[in-house]
């Protein structure tokens, strides 16, 4: 199928790449189907992807694996919150967090409090709110990403 998007233009997507959030995502309960778009125009070490709505062409959220910006990210999640994912194993589970990109890029944050959990095998997903206080809604990441980029550039230079 072809998907018209505001950010990426027309994107060809196979039906099996669609990710279904039965309950929608936080703040947007009617948006239930998404595709994950990787930005191939940026350098290879960039780990930011986009959760693009299938229903709403103008709606796309930048997302990232939380372990890239917080290597010790292991929240406790009640099993009943994971029911929308269907049957899964640890290898099937993809965890992503949303990125907020304000006009001042140095204030960029991720939301560690409300991760998106995706069963990559069944293509079912949910977004949950964690109980733990140690995971903030606004976790600064600019300096972390900048340092990671500098390390990657040094490694490529040798």
Image (spheres, rainbow, N blue to C red):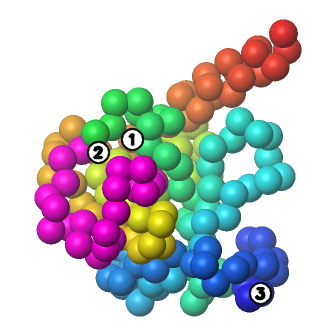
Quadrant of the rendered image containing residue 23: bottom left
Give the left or right position of residue 81, taking residue 66 as reference: left
**What residue lies at 29% left-to-right and 52% top-to-bottom?**
113
Tell me the quarter of the image containing the C terminus.
Answer: top right
> In this view of the protein, which residue sits in the foreground, 138 or 103?
138
Residue extent of the magenta highlight = 75-97
For label 2, count other residues whose C-alpha is less than 10 Å away and answer few (under 14), some (14-19) or many (20+).
some
Q: Which residue is disc 1 drawn over?
A: 139
> In this view of the protein, which residue sits in the foreground, 157 or 79?
79
Q: Is residue 6 visible to us here? A: no
**What residue lies at 50% left-to-right and 36% top-to-bottom?**
68
Q: Which residue is disc 3 drawn over?
A: 2
| Label 2: element kind | loop
The numbered mark at residue 136 is 2
Tell me: residue 142, above or below residue 30.
above
Camera-near label (3 vs 1) is 3
For label 3, count other residues whose C-alpha is less than 10 Å away and answer few (under 14), some (14-19) or many (20+).
few
Residue 122 in the image, given as x and y percentages of width and height = 45, 73
| Label 1: element kind | strand
Q: CA distance from mark 2 to mark 1?
A: 6 Å
| Label 3: element kind | strand
Camera-near label (2 vs 3) is 3
Q: CA distance from mark 3 to mark 1?
A: 35 Å
Residues at marks 2 and 1 touching, judged by CB atoms closer than 8 Å: yes
Quadrant of the rendered image containing residue 125: bottom left
| Residue 85 falls inside the magenta stretch | yes
**What residue lies at 34% left-to-right and 30% top-to-bottom?**
72
């Amino acid at each position: 199928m072809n998907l018209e998007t505001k950010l990426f233009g027309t994107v060809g997507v196979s039906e099996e790449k669609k990710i279904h959030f039965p309950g929608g995502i936080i703040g947007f309960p009617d948006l239930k189907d998404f595709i994950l778009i990787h930005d191939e125009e940026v350098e290879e070490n960039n780990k930011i992807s986009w959760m693009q709505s299938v229903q709403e062409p103008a709606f796309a959220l930048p997302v990232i694996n939380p372990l890239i910006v917080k290597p010790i990210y292991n929240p406790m999640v009640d099993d009943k919150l994971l029911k929308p994912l269907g049957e899964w194993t640890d290898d099937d589970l993809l965890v992503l967090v949303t990125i907020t990109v304000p006009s001042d890029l140095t204030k960029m944050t991720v939301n560690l409090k409300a991760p998106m959990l995706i069963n990559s095998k069944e293509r079912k997903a949910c977004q949950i709110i964690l109980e733990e206080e140690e995971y903030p809604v606004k976790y600064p990441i600019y300096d972390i990403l900048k340092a990671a980029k500098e390390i990657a550039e040094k490694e490529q230079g040798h």
